[in-house]
Image (cartoon, rainbow, N blue to C red):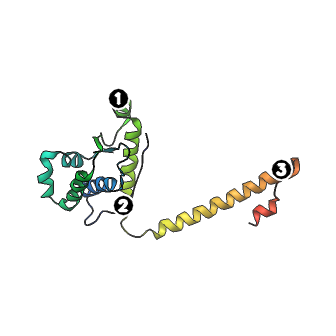
Amino acid sequence: TEAGFMCTKVPGRQTVPRAEAWAMHSILKIWHDELPLTIVFDASYVANGLKPHKMRKYLEGANADIWQLIYDRLDQLPHKPTAVKIKSHVNEIHLRHNTYPTAWLLANEAADAAANVFADHQGGRDIERLKDREGRRLYSTICKRLSAIDLHIHEVWGSPVITSEDIIYS
């Protein structure tokens, strides 16, 4: 079993149902249909939208543009993916007594956390990029220092492959 994540911007107004439907569309769009696919989600909105007797209602609703894309893609596929609605926001009891693989529940929690980050921050990401750059610079400096210490130990107790100066000034 493998799990995958993707992040994408929702066209139009950002709402939870629209984002959930867009996620379904995005997965169907990239699926190559060569291997079985199980799509796990916690949105009743998506579960209901996939029911054949509710299609007309969804094609007339606020997110009809996305549902049309979903239905068109499903019609193109010779093999349909398996769609599974799971419990959202699980707690310890759900984890202990669930009927789904724990990986599904944990992946769903991670997806919800990622969605919250994107929903809370719709603008640019300059501040985050700067923090990432500063963090990488610090990690790089620490790694170089640890390498220098390691090489010093090898110089004292054994023959080094390269000198500590080579690492420090690289």
Q: Amino acid at mark 3?
A: His
Q: Residues within 10 Å of mark 3 (few under 14, many from 20)?
A: some
Q: Which mark is residue 150?
A: none
Instruction: Looking at the picture, tell me which residue is in the foreground, 46 or 73.
Output: 73
Q: CA distance from mark 2 to mark 3?
A: 48 Å
Residue 111 x, y percent position in the rendering: 38, 50
Secondary structure, mark 2, is: loop
Q: CA distance from mark 2 to mark 1?
A: 33 Å
Q: Amino acid at mark 1?
A: His
Residue for point 50% across, 67% down: 129
Q: CA distance from mark 1 to mark 3?
A: 52 Å
- Check disc 2 and report the residue beneath it: 8
Residue for point 38% across, 30% down: 96
Q: Amino acid at mark 2?
A: Thr
Apparent side of residue 158 relative to residue 47 in the rendered image (left or right):
right
The answer to which of marks 2 and 3 sits earlier in the sequence is 2
- Check disc 3 and report the residue beneath it: 154
